[in-house]
Amino acid sequence: MVTSLALSECTIWIFITRGNVTMALHIRLPLIESPSKSAAENIAEHYRHLLFLSLEARIQPRPFDVSGLKTAPLRLSDGMLARLQKAATGADVDIKQAFASLCSEGLALHEAQRTAAATRLTPMAAPVDMGRFKSIQQAAFYRGMLDGLAGKKIVFCEGSTGLGKGRVIAMVACEQAKAGKTPVVISAPSLALVGQLYAEVVALGDDTVPVAAVVGASEFVDDEALLLYLQRAQDDPKLPVDEGVKDWAEDGGKPLNPKAIAAIAAGVSAAWLMDDLRSLCDVMPAEDFSLSEDAGTGARSAARAVVHAMRERAKNVQGIVLCSHMMLAAAQRTRWKGTLPMPKCILLDEAHLFESAVARVNSVQLSLFSMRVSLKRYIAAHEIGPSSVASQMLRDVGRLGEILQPLGDSANGATVTINDKGALSGPVRDSITQAVESICSKTTSRALEGLQHLPLYQAALEGVLRGMREEVHDKVRLNLSAVRGYPSIDSGPASVRVQLGDIWSTAEGGVALVSATLYAIGEDGEYHCDYTRSALGVPLSRAATPPPVREPHIVNIPTVHTLSASSYADFVPPERSDDGGLAAWHSRVSGAIGRIAQDARGGTLVLCTAYEDTRAIAKNLQDFGDRIVAQKPAHRFSAYVTEFNAKYAAGLRPVLLGVGVAWTGVDLVDGGVPAAEDWMLTDLVVCRLPINFNQSSTMRARVANTGIHPIISEALLYFKQGIGRLIRRDGVIDRNIWILDGRIHPSHSWPGMVRLRAGVRRMLRDYPKRQEADFILQALELR
């Protein structure tokens, strides 16, 4: 329910939910000029802070001329609004004059605080030796990071592709370690990136700084379970066995690639690596033999001993420790016991992905496939009958799968929130809850002692039940596995600000948040990191925001093509997909992509937002034959990248139609040739803007609390990442970016998304070479 309240010519919208007034009161207020606004805060935060300073100082408002000031809708808490209204009434001025007057006084107080802070001695980094850097931009990036950490700040370090961020991270980590801020933890979202950063640290050749890496226990094989399986397979021909796995296990699981980061982390005793097992498995279920995180002290098996020794080394390192985002988040969850030492300083690579990693670690996942396999093995090993607890539980798991599988299939690759009353009917939710309750009730039976992963199953089942019963605010989601479409359920929190806050306060020596995507276009048309700061729960008082650093070639090389006034309307995506408009839009977009791919010097990457788009466009472009690589649901994206590379190597100019990770995690570069001869990816196409990509429980909570602002900010960040896929090295030529979403044209009416359109257009103005793509329509005779 929404009610309106008039206060001195201002309209305040009070959003009421279940009879309680929320903390989201909107009021349009005049904004004084303020040169001291930080890039880490948005407009509302800044002016609320100025108002707060004046109110706390008990300053009385005065008459203030607001006629020439800009206005903006701001969110005020009910308490702050009441204090503002009381001050205005006491001074006999209207609320607009009171707000402007108090903000003006607050600005003076704010500037005085800044001056006082600047006079305090803050250690600064040593002068930069330019001989250590490949460019002025890299040196500036290094200096911004180092100066922020010298003040023990949380530094937002944005640097473009090709800047050499990994080398800077390694250099700064070594210097922080030498300054006594040990242990310094370097974290990255994937093991591949952890390995690259480890190589950068080692390449510096600084023997005075000890270096260690630690990976999760799940990166190792449960050798006990694998050997037992192979032993049973000798008596049961129905159990599939890969001969390569058998030979590898008999040889003690020695590492096939000693340079892999998991092998490096394990040290001289490295063995039983999951990547090795995955590479050897054709018919065996490799993931079923992953070691659980409760690896223990190592007394039970060789793999457990390797994990235990690795963790002990990392805990005792007085230098640099490298790990994944998930490992860092898991260490915080266990209060820094058993996996990582408590960090004094943290450097996060690809920091924009860290919040989602923390959310995943604080979520639980229930894999029905894994549970079925464990139960079947348990039943076979103990030779128990159909009336046993394990057999009953196996049937319950099967029934739950029968309920969930159709829901997942009908979602067509999307995530289904199964405790959302708007997503599923009451009877369906009840049937899911009852099935989970039935399974959960059996996990406490003593008859199941010895069932593999039983504690993990219990924790997951209990988490799902709490979410289904609405005992907590966690979202319960249904997903299908990437390859075979097996259903799984996960439950996660609406916010991880407490966990993030604990990590930031633990790293008292400072944190460097590193990424090519931290800053988005703000309401004033400038780049700000206020949204990223809010999502990561960084206190404004600790935020440091050196200017983003971008290598000039990122924007100077490509030509950006947008639609003209006479053509944009044909490329406005339909709002609904059931009225025939979607097929017509697919036809026009496919025609444009066909013309682009026909003239492209090399490969083309087409960024889509839904699998139905990739299917339809692939069908419309079937005349291109083997050139098309179309991503489908329930398949790993890396397989499509491999296919793209193979087609390029075969002399084709491949066209990859991708969604999801195609916007953020693909580097299509031919590193074996000079840049001027690299034609692997010459053209990038954006079919429509990436709106609503982030469907996490924490993202949905942000939208519920603050409205459409997070959706727009996320879309701008994803768009920035997407177009950044094209230029991955300097010196390439003949590069083109094509924006085929007609909604960004200023003539199109797009209610609620004006800031998104303005942000995209402002971003594209950074590219000096811009053209309107009217020739596409002329060639296709679509006008």
Image (tube, rainbow, N blue to C red):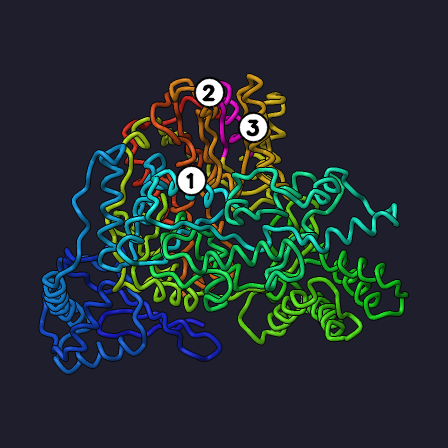
Residue 614 vertical position relative to residue 261 in the rendered view, above or below: above
Left or right of 653: which side holds 10?
Answer: left
Q: First in sequence, mark 1 or 2: give its number.
A: 1
Quadrant into which the N terminus falls: bottom left
Q: Which residues are magenta?
A: 586-606
Gap in Å between the C-alphas at discs 1 and 2? 36 Å
Gap in Å between the C-alphas at discs 3 and 1? 27 Å
Query: In the image, residue 42 lies at what x, y percent?
Result: 28, 58
Label 1, secondary structure: give it: helix
Residue holding disc 1: 199
- Along the viewing direction, whichever of 155 and 6 lies nearer the viewer: 155
Is residue 185 inside the magenta stretch? no
Which of discs 3 and 1 lies nearer the camera? The answer is 1
Residue 776 vertical position relative to residue 316 in the rendered view, above or below: above
Q: Main secondary structure of the magenta part?
A: helix
Q: First in sequence, mark 2 or 3: give its number.
A: 2
Residue holding disc 3: 644
Crowd band around label 2 with a 10 angstrom C-alpha radius: few (<14), some (14–19), many (20+): many
User: Type of residue at label 1?
Assistant: Ala
Residue holding disc 2: 600
Gap in Å between the C-alphas at discs 2 and 3? 15 Å
Left or right of 93: which side holds 696?
Answer: right
Crowd band around label 1 with a 10 angstrom C-alpha radius: few (<14), some (14–19), many (20+): some
